[in-house]
Image (cartoon, rainbow, N blue to C red):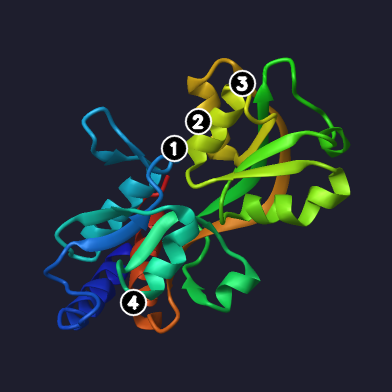
């Protein structure tokens, strides 16, 4: 079955060799918000690394492209750049939502996610009602930004928005905010490097991550999805 997928994928890739937006002889251009461990971050030498970077590079290999070019862009501006064709797709952790699906295409899900809150040690909480009067830091434009927007009045907290998740996390570590909210893998990766803060509360959102594409790019999305299926079956995703 894997061999059959590889053959069909090779045929489809060949068909895209002359596509103006997806040139087979050029690197796959992928948008990522570099700074969100463990998905995309800069190593000491300045080179991008992380799960989403590895995913982009492996997809490029499966598609027969000569590598992946990572374009660093704030999450809040990522979709605008995608629609403007500044890159071909994103492997960033984008939650599949109905309102987003009205504007763009998604791949099949590739990872489950949850929302996690972190606070300085000794200042955590065990119920959402304890957020009253606190300041929550978030990255602008993400699903956790939507959550705080939808729930600020109900739970009585205020919100500080940042263009990069590390800035939101650092706001809590430095005392400028009381709590940070982000994707659970991102929060846990930061906590591992910042002993002054800890995970306080996790919401099992039941949501999943998918790769995002332009609305008119259905054929290209299907091509990438075949590569994703192959990666799942040959063990690469694991």
| Mark in the foreground, 2 or 4 | 2
> 10 Å neighbourhood of mark 1: few (<14), some, or many (≥20)?
some
**Considering only order in the chain, which callout, 3 or 2, is on the residue closer to the N terminus?**
2
Residue hosting label 4: 220
From mark 2 to mark 4, how far is it between C-alphas? 32 Å
Residue hosting label 1: 38
| Mark in the foreground, 1 or 3 | 3
> 10 Å neighbourhood of mark 4: few (<14), some, or many (≥20)?
many
**Considering only order in the chain, which callout, 1 or 4, is on the residue closer to the N terminus?**
1
- For label 1, the SS is loop
From mark 4 to mark 1, how far is it between C-alphas? 27 Å
- For label 4, the SS is helix
- For label 3, the SS is strand
Pointer 2 with pointer 1, Cβ within 8 A? yes
Q: Relative to 170, is 183 above or below?
A: below
Residue hosting label 2: 189
């Amino acid at each position: 079955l894997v061999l059959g997928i590889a053959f069909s994928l090779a045929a489809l890739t060949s068909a895209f060799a002359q596509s103006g937006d997806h040139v087979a002889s050029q690197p796959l251009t992928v948008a990522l918000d570099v700074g969100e461990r463990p998905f995309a971050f800069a190593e000491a030498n300045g080179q991008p690394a992380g799960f989403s970077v590895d995913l982009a590079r492996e997809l490029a290999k499966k598609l027969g492209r000569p590598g992946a070019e990572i374009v660093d862009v704030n999450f809040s501006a990522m979709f605008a750049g995608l629609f403007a064709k500044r890159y071909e797709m994103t492997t960033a952790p984008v939650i599949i939502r109905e309102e987003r699906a009205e504007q763009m295409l998604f791949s099949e899900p590739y990872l489950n996610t949850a929302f996690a809150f972190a606070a300085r040690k000794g200042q955590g909480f065990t119920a959402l009602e304890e957020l009253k009067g606190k300041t929550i830091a978030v990255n602008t434009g993400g699903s956790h930004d939507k959550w705080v927007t939808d729930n600020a009045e109900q739970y009585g907290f205020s919100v500080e928005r940042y263009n990069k998740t590390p800035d939101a996390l650092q706001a809590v570590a430095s005392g400028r905010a009381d709590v940070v909210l982000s994707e659970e893998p991102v929060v846990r990766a930061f906590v591992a490097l910042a002993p002054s803060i800890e995970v306080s509360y996790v919401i099992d959102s039941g949501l999943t991550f998918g790769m995002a594409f332009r609305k008119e790019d259905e054929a290209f999305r299907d091509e990438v999805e075949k590569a994703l299926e192959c990666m799942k079956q040959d063990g690469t995703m694991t």
